[in-house]
Amino acid sequence: DVPVLVVGAPRTRLGAVASFVYGNPASSLQLLAVTGTNGKTTVAAMVESGLRAAGHVTGMIGTVGVVIDEVVHAGARTTPEATDLHATLAMMVEAGVRSVVMEVSSIALEEHRVDGVVYDVAAFTNLSQDHLDYHGTMQAYFEAKAGLFTAARARQAIIGVDDDWGKTLAEQCTIPHDTWSLLDPRASWHGFRAASGLEVVDPDGARHRLDVPMPGSFNVANAICAFAILVRAGVDPVDASRGISRVRVPGRMERFEAAGVTGIVDYAHSPDAIERVLRAARDESSGRIIAVVGAGGDRDSGKRPLMGQTAARLADVLVITDDNPRSEDPAAIRAAVREGAQRVAPLERAEIREEADRRAAITVAVGVAQAGDVVLVLGKGHEQGQDVGGVVTPFDDATVL
């Protein structure tokens, strides 16, 4: 006695249905989206901090979970399923949230998880190899991301143009959009070093001082992107800058100091991200760079040798270990990372060690460190567990380090 509607592709209808069931909560919120391979979590956190500095009651949905008015709730994935998303937005409306910033993954776009939502501002950080186990090719990966920058999903866009994919996106984008860049002064929003520190030039030519509390030029880029989003979302530039200066993101260039050694935990788990973090550490230190690196199982296997190659080229000591092997053989994953590391000429590559147990690997890295050195623990960032064979054991890189 229950009416049943049969459709060929339920996912393509689920967003609209979920929005209806929960009272169309998206229409009551200012919604901001961030997509890209690297930087999503940091940019989203900077934007959320800027919104709070402007007096907004905020929500955030992303890799580190769901945040409702500064209370953190666990999340299963970067971007929830459509039913969970609209339920969460409805909870945020009930809690008095005014503005929500979301990380939007390429897979979520492909799987219609954000259907029923039109973002007020959507931003693109960058694109490099990742998730090819799902998308197959970089072109397909790009096209999934580009789907966010259409009238069906966003009202305006902020597009990073420091890589070729961003330039292509800006050229083909049909909604009102600005560009941002760390490198190109022709971009709508661009940064430059002045006597007073970092300044950002807006589309009208006005200059704004920006204090970035996280190390690395890539975090300067993240801050420019976040600042542009905030101002386009109606936040006063002074509030935007103040909020960005206060941000701290768990597992993103998270720093620890002891006995003259600097420890850093970061979520870097792609070749490009590893390169960015290692170069940032090199710029900050006169000592050696000691990197702990692993690769996740049941994910893009093609990037594993490239991760090893990048780490071996830029570190002084490389400790290869397990990340989240999931259902795969951990030794086979480590072997792929090691194979890439050994591609680097012997005189140009790091001293390579291998230690399967992640806690032991971190212990090895810290044990060889001397005053002035930097120990980088990469790949898991904020995660609180390690998945081996489908069994998740509590594990926190920051605590262990």
Image: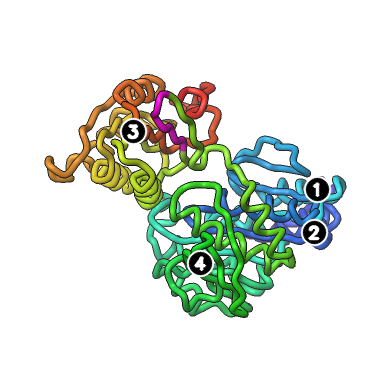
Circle 1 — which element? helix
Q: CA distance from mark 1 to mark 3?
A: 44 Å
Three-letter amino acid code at disc 1? Met
Horizontally, residue 69 falls left or right of residue 34, namely right
The segment highlighted magenta reads: 259-265
List the residue tagged with mark 4.
191
- Pointers 2 and 1 in contact (CB under 8 A)? yes
The mark nearer the N terminus, 2 or 3, is: 2
Q: Position of residue 112 (x, y in %)?
A: 62, 58
List the residue tagged with mark 2.
29
Query: Would you say the magenta stretch is mainly helix, strand or loop?
Result: strand
Name the foreground residue: 73 vs 259.
Answer: 259
Disc assigned to residue 373: 3
Q: Residue at x 56, y 67 (%)?
A: 200
Is residue 262 shown in magenta? yes
List the residue tagged with mark 1.
92
